[in-house]
Image (cartoon, rainbow, N blue to C red):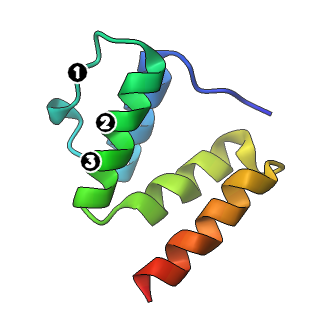
Amino acid sequence: PKTFYRSSEIERLAVVTGISAWTINWNQAAIYIWSELIQTAVNEKKLRLLLECIVQDGFEMRTDIIQLQSEVESWES
């Protein structure tokens, strides 16, 4: 499975999903960028869209991502 650890790859996900990329500090380790991106996605109600984009980009075989997707869908309803 694909791993997103470069800030440029993570930033592309933010742009594709319409998340406010300008609010994220891109000059830090990927784990902290992910944390900020996920928090921003939650705040902007775009977490489901972010997860869909991650799955489309190569995480489709990861059961933890798929489980998280279904949990997000249940939170939203």
Whether residue 28 sits left or right of residue 50 in the image: it is left
Q: Residue 36, which numbered label? A: 2
Asked if disc 2 and disc 1 are in contact, CB closer than 8 Å, the reply is yes
In front here: 63 or 9? 63
Q: Residue at x 71, y 61 (%)?
A: 66
Q: Which residue is drawn at 39% across and 45% down?
A: 16
Identify residue for label 3: 40
Mark 1 surroundings: few (<14), some (14-19) or many (≥20) residues within 10 A: few
Q: State the count of labels.
A: 3
Mark 3 surroundings: few (<14), some (14-19) or many (≥20) residues within 10 A: some
Q: Residue 25, which numbered label? A: 1
Q: Using the rendered view, name the quadrant where residue 14 is placed.
A: top left
Amino acid type, mark 3 = Thr
Q: Residue at x 20, y 43 (%)?
A: 20
Q: x, y (%) of residue 25? A: 22, 21
- Residue 18 visible in the picture: no
Whether residue 72 sits left or right of residue 68 in the image: it is left
